[in-house]
Amino acid sequence: MTKVIIIGGVAGGSKTAAKLKHLKPDYDITIYTKEQYVSYSACGFPFYIGGSIRDLDKLIIRTIDEFEGKGIHVKNFHEVLQILPNKKKVLIKNLKEDTEFYEDYDKLVIATGAEPFIPKISGTDIEYVYTLRNMVDARNIKKRLLESENALIIGGNYIGVELMESFIKQSVTTTIVEANTHLMKFYDKDISKIIQENIKIIQPTYTNIITSDTVTTLKKADEKIEVFTKKGKHFYTDMVVIAAGVKPCVNLAKDAGIEIGKTGAIKVDNKMRTSIEDIWAVGDCVEKFNIVSGEWEYIPLGSTANKEGRVCALNIAGFEDEVFEGVLASSVVKYFDYSMSKTGLSEVRARAVGYDVVSVLLTTLDKSKYMPDVKSITIKLLADKKTRKVLGVQSVGFGDADKRVNVLTMALLKGSTIDEFVNTDITYAPAVSTSIDPILTAAHILIDKLSNWFYFSLGCPTNFTNNLITFGIWQTNE
Ligand code: FAD
């Protein structure tokens, strides 16, 4: 019987196990995890912390008993200490009993994920300073939050911003400190500026945003934490969450001689195979091929981990035509009613990888202007001047911003030109869109621009209910 060991059981590991068991019921599959839980949605933690999901266990997708019921063994509180590829064995520590033993495998899957990146700050080990990665973290953060009046989040990207919403929902005044000039640094500056303005507007009394500065020191001061920043800010807070990004857990792989990519994550091919035979890797511990930039990048996301798990299982089961082509760096975040979404390259990134970028920035309505719930969205659409290939889109707003991003993903995957994309037959009804959808309007303007056709600035009075923008505008970068 083929014996499969999977190290790590959250998104990548559990998806691989479930799919493989489905394909090969006779395989002997065991997940080893050093944690108590497997198969949970870390993406749901902000909703538990903010109170919209009361019971943390609701975030468990599949319990250990459910796995066992399907014939998949789960060994929790078991840490894999070493991989011995020549002997096809792993060394495992039973953390509860403090014992070690070897287990052999025919196929091994590394799904060790990522861990929070801790910037160089003095005092990160004191009480009430947290990171958020697993169920225990989520529970601890919520417990402290409920006894707090104010909190500090270090890092203003998507987890920091999602957490700020959760904290404010629990009536906790929240300061966010971001080293970059704006929050949400993966967006171009013109978009992240708009994002930040709106984040300030949404909950002004509870929100304090500090950018272009870094926290240098955290000190315990009775039940509070004293905070010092590089630019001389000094304040007290009840708790701190460090949300400054993650780094891949690759030590096991590295020690076993498995190739690590230039991003610092495990190198895999499009079948999720590592450089050593019979060892696969999936999820946040592996680097991803960015289809638009043509480069290997580190873009750790749960959506990707699940897709990789599926492809990994299919290949282990012998369906070797199945490949994972790569990612487009698609993401979406919601902050209260405000959506931020992107796919493909930002303008900065596109220029960095050598594209001659033409872009259009359009603020418009998400549905027919006479609809009572009409809202604004801002779209930035990019194409390459020479090939006219679509390169990416960023879309933000109180309206339905992210669906405009999703329609572009197929065009990016297929390397379509803007002229091919513009023929996309997008649905329309007044309650959901405009007769020409905003993403197609953006595409029309981009074509005008690329073709040097005559274009002009258009002002259209609107009845927006938010106080961001009172006119729909076109802006162009050339
Ligand atoms: P992990 O989730 O990191 O799991 C790895 C597991 O392996 C862990 O349990 C770890 O303890 C275990 N392990 C590691 N080393 C060993 C060892 N030596 N022995 C045994 N066990 C080991 N993604 C999205 O796509 N959309 C979102 O909206 C989103 N929101 C998020 C919000 C938050 C707050 C967080 C924290 C993450 C979010 N993510 C989101 C990211 C997503 O959760 C991760 O991409 C996903 O969890 C990665 O899964 P993974 O299985 O690769 O790794």
Image (tube, helix red, strand yellow):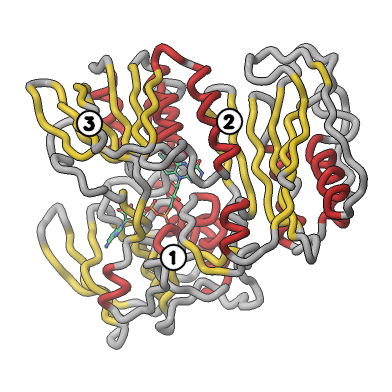
Q: Earlier in the sequence, mark 1 or mark 2?
A: 2
User: Is the N terminus in the top left, top right, bottom left or bottom right quadrant?
Assistant: bottom left
In the image, residue 299 sits, relative to residue 85, either above or below, namely above
Q: CA distance from mark 1 to mark 2?
A: 33 Å
**Is the CB–ligand 1 distance for label 1 below 8 Å?**
no
Q: Is label 2 or label 3 in front?
A: 3
Residue indicated by mark 1: 286
- Residue nearest the observer in this picture, 455 or 320: 455
Q: Earlier in the sequence, mark 2 or mark 3?
A: 2
Looking at the picture, how far across and down is residue 141, in whole percent? 28, 30
Q: Residues within 10 Å of mark 1 (few under 14, many from 20)?
A: many
Per the rendering, the mark at residue 35 is none
The answer to whether residue 10 is left or right of residue 349 is left
Q: CA distance from mark 2 to mark 3?
A: 27 Å
The answer to whether residue 277 is left or right of residue 228 is right
Q: SS at mark 3?
A: loop
Looking at the picture, how far across and down is residue 163, in whole percent? 40, 30
Residue indicated by mark 3: 232
The answer to whether residue 173 is left or right of residue 413 is left
Q: Residue at x 74, y 60 (%)?
A: 384
Q: Residues within 10 Å of mark 2 (few under 14, many from 20)?
A: some
Q: Amino acid at mark 3?
A: Gly
Q: Residue at x 41, y 12 (%)?
A: 205
Residue indicated by mark 2: 194
Q: SS at mark 1?
A: loop
Q: Amino acid at mark 2?
A: Ile
Q: Is label 1 or label 3 in front?
A: 3
Q: Residue at x 74, y 36 (%)?
A: 475
